[in-house]
Image: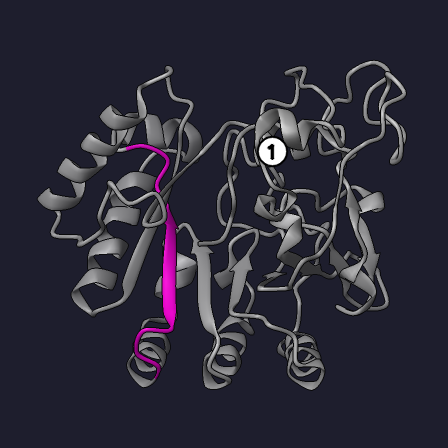
Amino acid sequence: MPDAVLPPGKFRDPVRTAKGERRAAVALSALRTLWFNTGTLCNLTCAHCYIESSPRNDALAYLSAREVAGYLDEVEREGMPVQEIGFTGGEPFMNPEMPEMLADTLARGFRTLVLTNAMRPMMRHQERLEALNAAHPGLLTIRVSLDHHDPALHEQERGPGSFATTMQSMQWLAARGFRVHLAGRAAFGHEPEAAMRAGFARLLTEHGIPVDAGDPVALMLFPEMDPEADVPEITEACWGILNKSPDSVMCASSRMVVRRKGAAGPSVLACTLLAYDAQFELGATLAEASRPVPLNHPHCARFCVLGGAACSR
C-alpha cells in the first residue's frame, strides 16, 4: 500500500538526493510524543485519507492494551522524557480495547491526545470517557476531525450526515467538560487561513463549543498531502536556506507504534505519516527506534519541512 507517487529519480537513496547532495536526516533530540496507531479500520471511507482508513482496511491491525502498556513500561523504565501520548488510527474507538489503553495512559499521568471523528464508535463509550475525564482532570484532549466549517465541504470528504453527527458529539463533549480541539483541512478552494478560522469561530460560537479558532493548536489546519505534487528533496543545506531547525520536525521528538497485519508483534515507526514505507520502520522497541531518520520521502518535504505541520501540540 504506497504512501505516495515518487517523482522520477527522487527519494531513492537515503543518503544522497537525485542531484548527489547529502540528504538531510533528523536525529531524535528527545522522545516527547509517543503515538499509538490503534489500527487502520474506520467507520468512514474519507476521500483523501492519508492512511487509506476504511471499514475494510486492516493493514494495521488492532494494538492491544497489553502491547501499549509494554511501551509505556519501557518509557518509565528507561526514564524517557515522554510528555504526551497520542492515539490515532483509523478511528481509535473502533479498537475494543481503546478505553483500557486510555485508562492506562491517564493513570500513569501522561497528557493524552486522541484523534477521532467523534461519531458512533466514540459515543459508544460515553460513560467510561466521562469517568476517565473526571478522574484525570486536565490530562485528556479529544481532537475532532472537522474538515471545514461548511457542512457541504466537510461531507465532501466524509459522506452525507457526518457533519451533523460530529457536531452533536462535540456538543456532548463540551457540555461535559472535555477539552476539545479540532483538526481541519487547509486546502479547500485556497480559502485564506484567516477566513477559514473566522468561519470556524462562528460555527463553534453558534453551537456553544469553547474552542479558540484563532489558536493554531486548538484548531490545527493541516496542509494537503497531494501525492501527485512534485516537491524538492531536503538536503543538509536546506536547514540554513529555510532558516529552520531539524528539531522542529516531527521525527526529532516523536515516534509511532503500529502492529502490521500478520506481524509477530508491534514495531516503531519514524512518524505518523509514513505507516506503509518499510524504510521508516525503526525497530521493535523505542530504544531501537532512537536512531536518526533520513528525510527520504515526499511527505517529509511536503508536510513537515515545507508545510510546517506537526501532529502534536
Q: Is residue 116 above or below residue 248?
A: below
Measuring 59% from the left and 22% from the top, which residue is drawn there?
A: 226
Q: Residue at x 52, y 82 (%)?
A: 104
Q: Residue at x 60, y 44 (%)?
A: 249
- Left or right? Give the position of 286 relative to 46: right
Q: Depth check: give the residue in front, 2 or 218.
A: 218
The residue at the point 79 percent across, 61 percent down is 289
Residue 178 lies in magenta, yes or no? no
The residue labelled by disc 1 is 305
Picture colour scheme = one colour
Residue 263, quarter of picture: bottom right
Q: Secondary structure at mark 1?
A: helix
Please, what is the three-letter code of the amino acid marked with disc 1?
Val
Q: Position of residue 232 (x, y in %)?
A: 70, 19
Residue 63, quarter of picture: bottom right
**Residue 38 in the figure: left or right of residue 288:** left
Q: Nearer the viewer, residue 297 or 168?
A: 297
How would you rate the neighbour count of disc 1 (Cα within 10 Å): few for under 14, some for 14-19, many for 20 or more? many
Q: Which residues are magenta?
A: 136-148
Number of dots carrying numbers: 1
